[in-house]
Amino acid sequence: MSKDARALARSTIAWLEVRGIPPTPEHYRVAFAHLSGEEPALSAAVGELEREGSGPDAIQLRALYERFFEGPDARALSEHGRRLAELAGRLQRELAEAGEETRRYGDTLSSVRAAVARPDDLARVVELLGRIADETERMHELATRLEGGLASGAAEIRELRRSLQAAQEAALTDPLTGLANRKRFDLALAGLAAEAAAERRPMTLIMADIDHFKDFNDRHGHRMGDLVLKLVADLLRDHFKGRDLVARYGGEEFAVILDDTPLPTGFKLAEQLRETLATRHLRTRDKTTIGRITLSLGLAELQPGEPIGRWVERADRALYAAKRAGRNRSVALAACEP
């Protein structure tokens, strides 16, 4: 963790303590996002609560967490789970009922077998034959009902599977840019790194940050800031394809996993991306020019046996080196550098 990140973490804890809010993961996530400026809309909501003098308190922070980080996708997953549990319970009850009817039908057949073994008891045989007819009709009705229930359940399961897959995809996608979100990035990074290590193929990580994005937001507003984020996301999506993964890492920071790519090739791709963006001149709808957007990029290649966290940290250090050197540049950090 960089010095800036450690300082921000301490500030986040202090911010919660001053307000008497317990530092749960949810409260910490909201406070960290607010203080770091990574979610301008969240910061605006916190600022409004502070101006009203009513908070934020623990309840309001939890509501902000649900609104900005949990959102409808997580609620959709919960609703799918509830519907699946209800469906499973219904099918279990129907199968239990079928089991009980089958047991009773078997008992009736056993009674008939016993009566037939005593041919002198013809009245009893006739009675049991009538029961067999009744039980057989009941079993037919049960089988028809069960078949319909199972068919309906299968259709519900197929629909649930489709909607669940859509919800899971949404839960791993950044809603603003359509890129992979931080959760999907973390999941993919571990898997791709393990594959690369097993197959001994190179892999390079790029961390990219929009230069002076906070100042741009302050001058032109969050709506224009969102448009810039989408512009950069589209450029990244078009520039890196195939097995490469592009993600919104947080706020104005993006990450790219370059599979089967050594550091020199990754650096060349990063520079091409940076130069392409630097030539763009943004204009408002009334054709007013508002300037250029530039990127600072840090790169690191995964080393044999290197922990994932250290790899990400090296790419992050390279990014901060690019920003310290004046921004609008790419810096590659070799493995031997501290």
Image (cartoon, grey):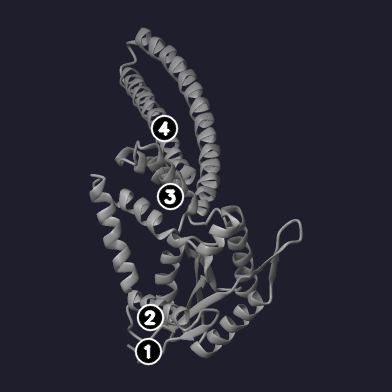
* Nearest to viewer (mark 2 / mark 4): 2
Circles 4 and 1: CB atoms closer than 8 Å: no
- Mark 1 — residue? 335
- Mark 4 — residue? 86
- Mark 3 — residue? 69
Q: Is residue 5 above or below residue 92?
A: below
Type of the residue with mark 1? Ala
Circles 1 and 2: CB atoms closer than 8 Å: yes
Callout 2 secondary element: helix
Mark nearer the N terminus (1 vs 3): 3
Circles 2 and 4: CB atoms closer than 8 Å: no
| Left or right relative to 58: residue 267 | right
Callout 1 secondary element: loop
- Identity of the residue drawn at 30% across and 17% down: 118
Question: Which image quarter: residue 314?
Answer: bottom left
Type of the residue with mark 4? Glu
Mark nearer the N terminus (3 vs 2): 3
Callout 3 secondary element: helix
Q: Where residue 117 sits: x, y (%)?
A: 32, 21
Quadrant of the image for the N terminus? bottom left
* Nearest to viewer (mark 3 / mark 4): 3
Q: Where residue 224 sits: x, y (%)?
A: 62, 57
- Mark 2 — residue? 314
Distance between mark 1 and mark 2 Cα atoms: 8 Å
Q: Which mark is residue 195?
A: none
Type of the residue with mark 3? Phe
- Identity of the residue drawn at 54% across and 82% down: 329
